[in-house]
Amino acid sequence: MVSSSIIRQTPRQVGGGRERAALVRQAKKSITRGSKSFSLASKLFDRATRERVWLLYAWCRRCDDIADGQDHGASILKLDDATTKQRVLAIRILTERALQGQPTAELAFDAFNQVSAECRLTQEEANDVIEGFALDAQGWRPRTEEDLMRYCFHVAGAVGVMMAKVMGVSGEDHETLDRACDLGLAFQLVNIARDVSDDDAAGRCYIPLEWQAEADLPPGMRLRPEYREQLVALVARMLDIAEQHEAAARFGANGLRFRQRWAVLSAAGIYGAIGRKVRAAGPHAWDHRIHTSAWSKLGFVARGFVDAIRGAPEPEVWPKHTRGSLMTAARMAGPPAPMPMTPLPDEA
């Protein structure tokens, strides 16, 4: 046994001891490979903001990949419950180490160490995101609309809040953080609407059970041809909510600096277009994965420039679900599971 008085603690190291430039290079590769839409929008930021966005994205992408056993979003694996829970536990431990300023031996988590130190990201904010992976690990499915929106808060709304802080928004500027959350919620609802077929193949469904019951849509039958009409109506309902949150986010972007506003509105335009294409495709929306072309993305960047100059009007209808109500629901659901911190070999 070694006396506790002589155990060597690993000193705090920003970026896990890696050079910031190396972290930025790898983070840029991650966003370029993982999301063409976000990669394009990120280029509209000033250099400092752009690099921080890449660093945060790298952490989000790596967490998602660890949780689902995938590589940059490709081919979600059907993992057993025990394996999935262990993966989420690994995400928690690595993230806590990063926030404590400890090296993780995982580049994306060291990138999170770097950006969290620069932008004062908190453990609570990180936990809000990780809880989305934990819900999937539990095989959780939304029963109500409120459940759906709480899930969207964890996996995207909370990311929007962190992105706003990366852009320099103060943690006390709750109005702007609320609107950033709205943008994340809109993006996730569009993702869910587009990915009904992919989620079904992975054994997942995020359409609330109450909605399905109201539409006389039997569980597990949503993609059957005879039930496509009901599915189309439910997805349209989801996209209606997404558009309300998008409108709120656009209005909130008025308070950002010009280049930030331009980037946010360009991304909103790209994702909004995906939602509209899903709606327009009706029962054929899931015959193949809907996306926007490179030329279309450039068109939305140009339109985003004009929108950033003009500014967005206040929404006629504000979303029912707010960041405050969703955070309250998340807290009432209980804190994340405790993280046993086993010292790594270099700490003994």
Image: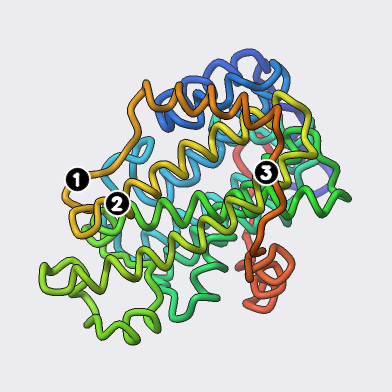
Indicate which disc residue 97 carries. 3
Identity of the amino acid at label 2? Ala
Using the rendered view, name the quadrant where residue 23 is placed: top right
| Label 1 Cα crowd, 10 Å radius (few <14 / some 14-19 / many 20+) | few
In the rendering, at what x and y percent does residue 153 appear? Answer: 59, 60
Left or right: 87, with 76 as reference point: right
Q: Secondary structure at mark 3?
A: helix
Label 2 Cα crowd, 10 Å radius (few <14 / some 14-19 / many 20+): few
Q: Which mark is residue 55?
A: none
Q: Earlier in the sequence, mark 2 or mark 3?
A: 3
In this rendered view, identify the residue nearer to me: 112 or 262.
262
- Residue 119: horizontal and vertical position, in percent? 79, 35
Question: In front: 40, or 30?
Answer: 40
Q: Is residue 191 above or below residue 254?
A: below
Contact? badges 2 and 1 (CB < 8 Å) = no
Instruction: Locate residue 238 relative to residue 224 in the image: left or right.
Output: right
Residue, disc 2: 280
**Does 9 sit left or right of 137 as displayed?**
right
Q: Is residue 8 visible?
A: no
Q: Earlier in the sequence, mark 3 or mark 1?
A: 3
* Residue 189 in the image: above or below residue 111: below
